[in-house]
Image (tube, helix red, strand yellow):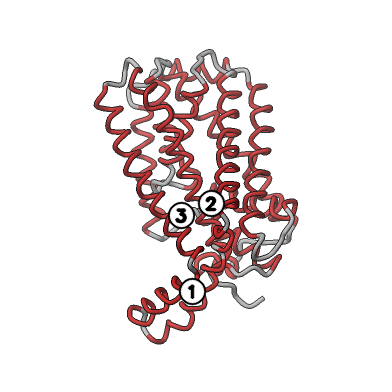
Amino acid sequence: MKKWQFWLGIAISAVFLYFALRGLNLGDFWSAIKSANYWWIFPGIAVYFVGVWARAWRWHYLLKPIKNIKTRVMFPITCIGYMGNNIYPARAGEVLRAVVLKRKEGVAISASLATIIVERVFDSVVMLAFVFVNLPELAKVAKFDSGFAGNIQQLAFIGMGIFLGALIIFLLAAMFPKTTEKICLWLINRIIPKKFREKTIGITLKFLEGLVSLRSPANVLMVFFTSVIIWLLETVKYWFVMHAFTFTVSFFALMLLNGIANLVTIIPAAPGYIGTWEAVTKAILVAYNVPGGEALGYAIVLHVALWLPITLLGAYYMTREGIKWNDTLRKETENNEPQAE
């Protein structure tokens, strides 16, 4: 609570919430919330958890060259990680699931984090692909002039360049491990102070070990294909929740919304992406001529439907595993290194 990053996130969320609420007719908002048919949320949640299982399978697949851990073992840990992202700042859940995996299966935290970063790179590439596929439709929307669409297109190109660049670097590191190891050791010996070198070298080597699954083109294609399936399943949830309200937009519009809204969560907002999610979701739907009150109602209901079930299930699994958010676990998560048991 005392860290400046936490309060910066709160401030950013407050700014985005201001934009989400600006000019809003609260009567229209409450009317949309009260008249929604919430039964549509349940099939959406079911589809979402199929996607979570696919995420657990993808993580199992990336870790397979290091240790073959069954998907049913990975699923609870994946849920714990997403719970952590929802309630702790700075996406601490990503490190939390690496720490839990270390405790349960003995996989080095650095190696786990390498696979998690690879997941995030693939996710970002797919999100940007969703934006690219739907840019022509965005440009045709009446309330979005060509300049706005052009700005999104420019940002998408920049983002695609960044994430594809990161993916290429990971692929090269996996394909040429000896050369990469020599380069890393050369940099560490010249940049890192001597007293930290041994620890840094150990972490780096374990991290490189986590990239081994990318040495096979078939593995890369499989991970990419799985990532596409995961995000299409999440878009199906958006589609189900939409039916709880009176508006209708195309599935492609929801793909665009999915891509932009999730890319915006990179912004360091409050835990659970409060504010950033609502503002962007409302803005995209208003662009498709959805009334502002109903657009914000949908944004909040969808956000709760995405946030609450996985958070509750993650908390259940964390309790079942006997894991407590105590000082030891917090230090492991902050330092990315296992403490003595």
Q: Position of residue 277 (x, y in %)?
A: 44, 36
Does residue 257 appear to the left or right of 227 in the view shown? left
Q: Position of residue 219 (x, y in %)?
A: 60, 52
Q: Residue at x 57, y 39 (%)?
A: 307
- Front tag of 3 and 2: 2
Q: Quadrant of residue 26?
A: top left
* Residue 90: assigned label: 3
The amino acid type found where label 3 is placed reads: Ala
Q: Is residue 312 above or below residue 19?
A: below
The amino acid type found where label 2 is placed reads: Glu
- Front tag of 2 and 1: 1
Report the quarter where the C terminus lies.
Answer: bottom right
Describe the element under mark 1 as helix, strand or loop.
helix
Q: Quadrant of residue 340?
A: bottom right
**In the foreground, 181 or 261:** 181
The residue under label 2 is: 119
**In the foreground, 43 or 293:** 43
* Residue 178: assigned label: 1
Q: Residues within 10 Å of mark 2 (few under 14, many from 20)?
A: some
For the residues bearing labels 3 and 1, Cβ distance under 8 angstroms = no
Q: Residue at x 48, y 33 (%)?
A: 258
